[in-house]
Image (cartoon, rainbow, N blue to C red):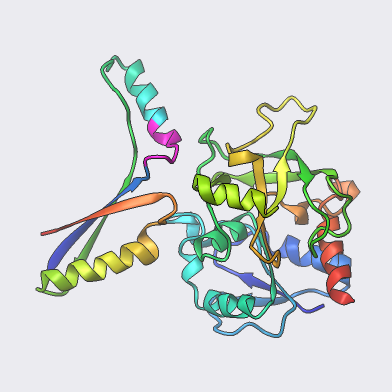
């Protein structure tokens, strides 16, 4: 079995009000060296295969077709 | 006019929308469950508001992959008219029938209130009963209504006159008048042939003066008049 992790982040130009709210909260807690906060998503998928290339290919398709919206999000895939 | 209403699990405006159609046309639309694979004969298909599939992943993302949506995409290419209200709008952007995306409100809050809207053009089947640039009131109720699109596509949408409704200044205490941070105050957009409309406000909740206004009824009346001829 291969465990695949998909990291989803908002594209650079898309405003991230959640990240901004976290930023402000952290500032209020005394963390004053923060230069920016962006919030994303992490999705773990276990695949019944031993073939890393196949796993990567499959999860790339899943990410493009459902897990992310290409208008607002980017993704990276990690296999283990 | 044959109208179909697609029902997803988590939809909660289907009955209001059905009632609005009945109110204007005299008969209820056909209700189509999302697992169906073929739409019945329809001139117009409506995707109602709500929280399909609990808004999991992204609002409208899972509904956009429903079997019935495949048929909707096919039939919209053949010229069927489509209206997406609120969550229906989100589904239309997620399945690619409309451009752009509806991201979280910039306030991070669910906003439920009346908004003032400008009807940008009155030459489509959805708006023919309005005056050009008529200002109207309709309620909104959403968390993800912040219309976002890349700069070039936004420019193209504006140039092609595909903005259907814009949030405009009102005299109410609410501030700001743009309730969610939408680019160019966009509340609704058309596709490139003006046969598909998505909007965040709820016209089906504004069809009667005794329940807060009837400006939304004009959308249903426009469609009925245009499609019954």
Q: Main secondary structure of the magenta part?
A: loop
From the image, which quarter does the C terminus of chain A lie in? Answer: bottom left
Tell me the quarter of the picture where residue B195 sits: bottom right
Residue B171: percent from left, percent from top: 80, 27
At 75% across and 78% down in the image, what residue appears?
Answer: B43
Residue B120: percent from left, percent from top: 77, 48
Tell me the quarter of the picture where residue B30 sits: bottom right
Is A14 contained in the magenta span?
Answer: yes
In-image side of B151 versus B46 (left or right): left
Residue B33: percent from left, percent from top: 59, 76
Is B163 contained in the magenta span?
Answer: no
Residue B9: percent from left, percent from top: 54, 66
From the image, which quarter does the N terminus of chain A lie in? Answer: bottom left
Instruction: Judge whether B209 appears above or below B21 on screen.
Output: above
Towards the viewer: B106 or B197:
B197
Regarding residue B111, the answer to whether it shows in the image is no
Regarding residue B105, the answer to whether it shows in the image is yes
Instruction: Judge whether B176 appears above or below B122 on screen.
Output: above
In-image side of B58 versus B143 (left or right): left
* Magenta residues, start to end: A12-19
Towards the viewer: B98 or B220:
B98
Towards the viewer: B187 or B201:
B187
In-image side of B6 versus B124 (left or right): left
At 32% across and 67% down in the image, what residue appears?
Answer: A62
């Amino acid at each position: 079995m291969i465990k695949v992790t998909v990291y989803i982040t908002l594209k650079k130009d898309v405003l991230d009000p959640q990240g901004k709210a976290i930023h402000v909260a952290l500032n209020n807690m005394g963390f004053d060296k923060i230069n920016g906060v962006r919030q994303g998503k992490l999705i773990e998928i276990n695949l019944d295969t031993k073939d890393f290339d196949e796993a990567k290919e499959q999860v790339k398709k899943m990410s493009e077709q459902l897990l992310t919206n290409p208008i607002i999000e980017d993704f990276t895939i990690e296999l283990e | 006019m044959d109208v179909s209403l697609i029902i997803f699990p988590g939809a909660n405006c289907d009955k209001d929308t059905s009632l609005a159609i009945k109110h204007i046309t005299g008969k209820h639309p056909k209700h189509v469950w999302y697992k169906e694979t073929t739409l019945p004969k329809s001139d117009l298909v409506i995707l109602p508001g709500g929280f399909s599939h609990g808004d999991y992943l992204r609002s409208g993302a899972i509904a956009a992959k429903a079997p019935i949506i495949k048929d909707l995409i096919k039939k919209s290419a053949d010229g069927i008219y489509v209206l997406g209200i609120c969550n229906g709008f989100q589904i239309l952007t997620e399945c690619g029938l409309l451009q752009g995306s509806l991201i979280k409100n910039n306030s991070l809050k669910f906003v439920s209130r009346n908004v003032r809207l400008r009807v940008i053009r009155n030459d489509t089947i959805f708006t023919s009963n309005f005056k050009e640039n008529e200002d109207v009131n309709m309620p909104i109720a959403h968390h993800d209504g912040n219309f976002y699109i890349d700069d070039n596509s936004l420019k193209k949408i504006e140039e092609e006159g595909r903005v259907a409704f814009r949030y405009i200044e009102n005299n109410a205490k609410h501030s700001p008048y743009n309730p969610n941070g939408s680019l160019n105050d966009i509340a609704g957009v058309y596709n490139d042939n003006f046969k598909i409309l998505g909007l965040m406000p709820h016209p089906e909740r504004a069809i009667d003066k005794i329940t807060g206004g009837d400006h939304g009824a004009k959308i249903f009346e426009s469609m009925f008049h245009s499609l019954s001829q």
